[in-house]
Image (cartoon, rainbow, N blue to C red):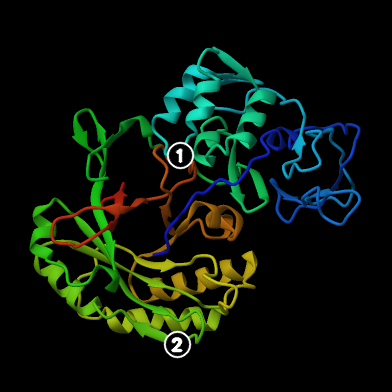
Amino acid sequence: MAQMKHRILSFVMSAAAALSLMAPLTTTAYALNVNDPKPGQQTFNVRDKNSSSSEPKINIKNGSSSSKKVQIKDSGSSSSASPKINVKSSGNAGSGGRDGDTFSVAKIKEYAKEIDNVSDDFLKVIRNKSTITLSQFEDYAVKYKLPIELIQRFYDDRFVFKSGNKFQFISLDPNLSRNVYDWDNLVYKDNNEVKYVRDGASRALKGIDVSTHQGTIDWKKVKNDGVKFAMIRVGYRGYGTGKIMLDDQFKRNIKNATANGIKVGVYFYSQAITTKEAVEEAEFVLDNIKGYDIDYPVVFDIEDAPSASARTRSLTASKATQVAKAFCERIEQGGYRPMIYTYTKYFVTEINMGSLTKYDKWVAQYYKRPFFPYKFQMLQYTSKGKVDGIKGNVDMNLCFTSYPK
């Protein structure tokens, strides 16, 4: 599966607070246009001050055609490429460590220990402080390129995403069921393995997902290393040609995994752009899993277009939802349990989860403390796991449900 990479180029922290403002403020230096493709979603496209335009704009898409204005604080330097939105927060939108517009430095330091790539210079600056303000936090976030994973820890009422110069703060959907997982129960091991332990016992099953990229696997060793289940790639559709291909190692993997007592599910990496193609992919999967014991779900793997030339590059959220639903319906008709796999941002911004609530979810997110409040059954938490019997890295998973059910 595609790697999830979280790289922070820059950050406009106070934009999150702007989402909750009811009354417009005055504007200086920058114009703000608002038009939202989804309820609760604000998208900030930042144009560099050095562009040919005499008035750099931050375009926010928000369901209304009316314009909202916010006060913009200019850095004062013509070379700055990081304009900042300077607004006040309307109450406590954060989790532990945030009280309205005030952030606990002790909590920032605590969270920073769990997260890679937090600037040492940033930690030195806040070393002798007990708290910092929202304004200070936003300045530090931009200057020291703080990871989104760290910033997310202070926002439990919305998702925080970033890609290039686009910043999104997306409110949680009140209509979606929540999970009840307590991430304080996570226990980390030296080999990048994570356990979910409560009352001294493991409460989630250890699993892996594999494809031809793992080469020839010694499934006996995998079993002896404590792996309880494996999600095995059946095949994929080419993102250029659109041709459906069988994974080179599928038959070997499913045969040897089940022979060694490991329960299996399967997944198909889709590049379908129509419901007809999605059904075609489902038929391909059903044909190839005949005769095998499939205890875990049959998974539709949908992700962003891997390149600008990919056939799915123009797939809309509406169409992606229809495609996923078509695949899952056909799998269900075939007598198997369907599931949808993707990463957090795709679930939240590129698909309509409200139309897919009947299907199990498999979420990929490589945070030390996951942030996905909606109901899901499986978590892919790293692509750098180590398991005896597999050369190199392997994706590692936790399953919170006992399949079959």
Vertical comparison of 33 with 158: above or below: below
**Which corner quadrant holds the C terminus?**
bottom left
In the image, what residue occupies the spot 9% across and 59% down? 221
- Whether the residues at callouts 2 and 1 have beta carbons within 8 Å, the answer is no
In the image, what residue occupies the spot 20% across and 71% down? 293
Residue 78 visible in the displayed image: yes
Instruction: Give the quarter of the image for residue 223.
Output: bottom left
**Amino acid at circle 1:** Asn
Helix or strand or loop: what does disc 2 sit on? loop
The spot of residue 252 in percent (x, y) is 17, 77
Q: Residues within 10 Å of mark 1 (few under 14, many from 20)?
A: few
Vertical comparison of 199 with 38: above or below: above
Mark 2 — residue?
Answer: 243
Mark 1 — residue?
Answer: 117
**Amino acid at circle 2:** Lys
Residue 97 visible in the displayed image: no
The spot of residue 239 in percent (x, y) is 50, 79
